[in-house]
Amino acid sequence: MGETEAEADVETSAEAETKTGTETETGSASRADSEANAERIEGTTAATESETISETASLTETPLRVDDLHKSFGGITAVDGASFDVESGSLTGLIGPNGAGKSTTFDLITGTIALDSGSVYFNGEDVTGLPPHATARKGLVRTFQIARQLADMTVLENVMLAPQHQSGESLWRSVLPFARRGIRREEGELLTQVWDTLDFFDISHLAHEDAGNLSGGQRKLLEFARALSTDPDMLLLDEPFAGVNPTLEKRLLSHIHELREEGYTFLIVEHDMDLIMDNCERVIVMHQGRVLADDAPEAILEDEQVIDAYLGGTV
Amino acid sequence: MSTSPDGDADTIAAGGETDQETPSVERGDSASAGPDNEGTGTGDTVGSFFDRDITLILAVIGGIYLAYLLAGLALGFEARGLINVVARLTFLIGVFSMLALALNLHWGYTGLFNIGVVGFMAVGIYTMAMVSKPVGTGGSAQVPGLGLPIWVGIIAGVVVATLLGLLVALPALRLRADYLAIVTIAMSEIVRFIYMSGQFQEFTLFGAQLGTGGGSGLILNYADPLAALLAFLGLSEVYDGLVGAVSTVIPNNPAPVVNQFVYAALLMGFVAGFYWLLKRTGESPFGRVLKAIREDEDATSSLGKNTNRFKIKSFMLGCALMGLGGILWYMGQGAVTPLSFRPQITFFVWIALIIGGAGSNTGSVIGGAVFAAVLFEGPLYFRNLVVRAFPVGNAPTTFGEALSPLLSALDVIPLIAFTLDNMSTLRLVIMGVVLVLIMKNRPEGLMGHRTETASTIDLSRPERRETRSDSTPATAADGGRSDG
Amino acid sequence: MGIADTYSDGRRYVVDRPFALVVGLLVILLAVDFVDGLATGRIAVSDVATLVWDGLMQGLVVGLAGIGLSMTYSILNFANFAHGDYITGGAFSGWAVTYLLAGLGRADVGSLLLIGAGGSVFGGALGIGVTATPVAVLGGLVIAGLFAVVLALVIDRLVYRSMRDQEGISLLIASVGVAFALRYLIAFVFTTENRGVTDAGGVPEVRGYLLDGFVTVSAHDATLLVVAVGLMLSVHFLLQRTKLGTAMRAMADNEDLARVTGIPTERVVRATWVIGGALTGVAGYMFVLWKGTIGFNDGWLLLLLVFAAVILGGIGSVYGAIIGGLVIGLTSSLSVLWIPSDFARAAAFLVMILVLIFRPEGLFQGRSTA
């Protein structure tokens, strides 16, 4: 189907929409909107593109600023005064030996566990100690090192869960006959996007499979897809490529670069050094709960302390 | 791209007047079905799935009736007996299905381990009774109520059960499942102690006399709920006609039989209502979040869902339905006593849910029906049948007297007679064994793993219909954001 | 330390420990009322002493039964709702033997073994008591412990063993099934009637005058005290001085790690059931001896109090269970000083709910395994 035809379709259905949908508030879609949407057919993330751009325009240069984080678990210090910030639209790597406190740092930033002291700012706003759902709502979304798939739900349900502001999450709207119509339409729209997302992550053949039956790599992909579907400003990815096959890894990386250019910010924990050095413009090295180095990849590779930490460290 | 451009041309030609119908009929898929055909337009897959579930439920219940009726007929029960059997069976299927459905929302959907079901039931019926019982002393043993209409009492009962749910939910929902279990069962026992206590037997609230009746309970001396409902609907005469018609089959005092039967049938209407409500609740974005909380609460909240609010809402809704279930169970029984609200009722509901398979609304109804017919009523009915067919004479009074003839003279009859005589005790043993067997061998319920997709629509891949699918994100974004 | 420091310390205390604060205030309030009651003569000292003694006895039973529940809760990781019916099972088996030993030759064996079901024999008529029929009581006590061990092991073999890798909640639900089956099997065999089993008039008592009235201690009270304290001490030595105790603690802390380090987990599980079962059976027997009646619901009615004790003391802690039992026993017994006796059990449950909500790890920092 050609470009022009598609546009014609858009127009007719937009008309239909306004005519038949007047009884619900969702029916008031303007033509301008639907034309803008015509461009979103291409990819999943494109659907949120225009918004993200307009939002990021007002953002600060450093969306995430972490200041002097501390956390210990019964006597054992996991994070010991970590401070760093992440530049807007960057792809920053967070590396370090096992037990350096990388995942715990993610937990502290997103409020998954309570911090002992320190502060976290996101887009200039103090988000220290906010519960995870609140930080996620502000556009700061993380994935987990061990993928947290919702095992007894299908892959589709997993991804359908993620988008924010679904009006069907209100109990009464879901149940009452009249309001439910709007929900059904909204879900129909969501579904198309979700299928596109699944296509992109190459897991659409698993759409109806229970997430518990997926392989490790597939779970990672599902979690990435789910996090992206929340339409975040910044993604904290904890080893997103563990178990993902190299071809797909390449595709995902190129997609991450695309998203980055659109204004998304990424902070990635990864063990594959080559991957980090090739793709990140900045690398933060953590060791024993502290930030050891924070520099460009080339500089990191020559940093004596980093080499010591990796080669000489016993942990 | 299955639809030809002609279809779109038609749409344009129709000038937007009938364009909704044309494409949706052609495409027959849910995403394009549009808002105009809410009842039927769920798409073929969803439609047939829905029908299949209803058919399954009706088949199971039908099978149960058939078995009971055939057994009754074979043993020459009279019409009165048969109708009574069906009415009682329907009543039990109704109450257990309703309660299992409500519990399924807690445990099956949200993963909230509530074993205080009976507490919410008690609060529902007691509140209803205290509100609706007539004012003033109607006799020496009569506790006065507020004298309000029955429907006010029902609403009050449901509201108070919901509020008790909130009271429990606020502090307790963040607890681990086994701790929540212990808190809820302790709560239900505290509720029972309160109703049992003489302290609140009769008290004055804002100048009005009312009370719980203490250990002897409350006599439900308000207007007969069924008669009141019929009068309200203007169906009293129709009903009298029905009773008259039945009197040709049961000449002697048919009214109680008909009353019982019609009340039980009404209960089934409530089961349908519960099912409808909870199916919609489950098959929605709301239900999707509940399922996600059940699977992994941390992961769910990392996706921006305020899990506590969802849990509280789910808990309160379930408690409201349990309160209503309690009201409907005891409303027509003439009296309530605290003895009726011991924790074993909670476990009956649990067994019903586990039989049908937690997480499935259809399973809950089937589990309720199977529990009521096979485990709750079945052993007693079986006993009656056997005793009628093979009179075994007087049963021995103790297990020893029953066992010794078997040991000394290989006479098994006394033991059988004793077993039959104590069937109401033995059935609880059977329930326990069945529960263990299911948990060990089929933890997903008798019907195995069932998938009830948590979405308002069929989730199969929409056909590539750019016409609709790309005009829609705008509404999602706008509509969703402005009111989210 | 300045005033500001004290103030901020106080404020942090209020914010961090709201539960402790509320409990503290409540305790002060009750204490003031109590002292006032004593001063005005509204509350008699001897009554208080009787209540304390009563609560102590109840607490010993609950604590003794609680040790077993606490051990299985932490090592097998599930709340065993059938535990109450292990108590009942132990009691009935033990009392059947006591009846047999005390009444042999005076009534037929069947009636004796059924503990006089259907009113065929009466414990009072047999003159059962710890002083009158010591052999029968001792025999019953031993059998109660042994039977509960066998019961626990058989049920573990039939039900729980194949479910070890399942979640605690599945096991909990299965244990509810076990509870139903056991309880009503007992009711089926022994009937549902509650009956007296001891010769209540023939039990020696010591009456002491305390300030304003008499306090009575019976021989059965003393027996309960001796047996319970003796067993608690034995368990203490067993867990402190043997490798078994170390292995149990290791398993309660981290089962996978314990397995890796070569602890024979199945054997530890069996030992847990044996020790826990024995204490539970004895607790059931002693409970019946102390109160003088037996009923098929006894253990079930005790179960929530036992749970309360275990949670209060911290799941997995043996001493916690004992202290928790005493606290629960005294709470329900002494609560009648302030609230109607109808709510004695409710008070104990309320304490448990508050602990679960505000201090789920227990009052004494016991190890929780979850």
Image: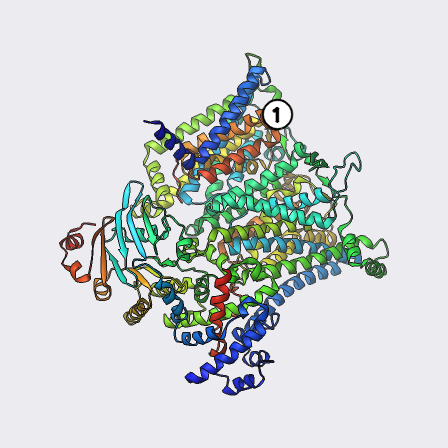
The answer to whether any part of residue B258 appears in the image is no
Q: Please give left or right for residue C245 compared with residue B335 in the image.
A: left
Q: Give the residue drawn at x 49%, y 83%.
A: B2
In percent of width and height, residue B235 lies at: 80, 59
- Is B21 located above or below residue B96 in the figure? below
Question: In the image shown, does A77 or B339 lie closer to the viewer?
Answer: A77
Residue on which disc 1 sits:
C126
Residue C32 vs B76, above or below: the answer is: above
Q: Nearer the viewer, residue C240 or B166?
A: B166
Q: Chain of mark 1?
A: C
Front residue of B55 and C294:
B55
Q: Which kind of residue does numbered mark 1 sit on?
A: Leu
Q: Secondary structure at mark 1?
A: helix
Residue C103 x %, y %: 60, 27
Where is residue B99? Give x, y as percent: 61, 52
Query: In the image, residue A270 lies at what x, y percent?
Result: 26, 60
Callout 1 crowding tier (Cα within 10 Å): few <14, some 14–19, many ≥20: some
Image quadrant where residue B136 sits: top right
Q: How is the image coloured?
A: rainbow
- The answer to whether residue B427 of the structure is visible from this angle is yes
Apparent side of residue B471 relative to residue A63 in the rendered image (left or right): right
- Residue sitting farthest toward the bottom: B6
Q: Nearer the viewer, residue B474 or A178?
A: B474
